[in-house]
Amino acid sequence: MVKFLIELFINLGYIVIAEGVETQHQFKILKEMGCIKIQGYYINKPIDAKEIEGILLQKMHF
């Protein structure tokens, strides 16, 4: 069912983002199905706006 939905929305021209991905194994399976954009604990724990601002400023070398 998941593979069908990923393929359907990709074929309709949508960008598919999987939410709640927590493990490398889940990401690998989703990637094999064609979903390469993810969010969830596998990428990073949730952080507040101030933390994001600090991270972005560090990466921009301000």
Image (tube, grey):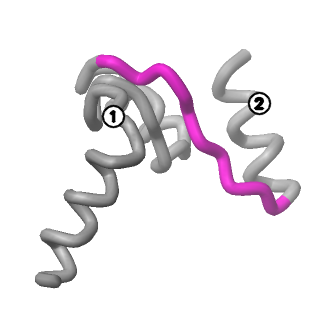
Residue 25 is situated, as x and y percent measured from the top left of the image, at 27, 20
Q: Is residue 16 magenta?
A: yes
The residue under label 1 is 47
Whichever of labels 1 and 2 marks the residue nearer the N terminus, that label is: 2
> What's drawn in magenta, residue-wise?
13-22
Residue 15 is situated, as x and y percent measured from the top left of the image, at 68, 55
The residue shown at (74%, 52%) is: 10
Out of 31 and 49, give the one closest to the viewer.
Answer: 49
Instruction: Please tell me whether the stretch drawn in magenta is mainly helix, strand or loop.
Output: loop
The residue shown at (16%, 83%) is: 62
Mark 1 residue type: Ile
Q: Residue furthest front?
A: 50
> Is residue 10 depicted above or below 20 in this figure?
below
Q: Secondary structure at mark 1?
A: loop
Mark 2 residue type: Leu
Out of 36 and 57, give the one closest to the viewer.
Answer: 57
In what quadrant of the picture does the N terminus appear? top right
Q: Residue furthest right?
A: 12
Q: What is the total number of numbered labels drawn onto the structure image?
A: 2
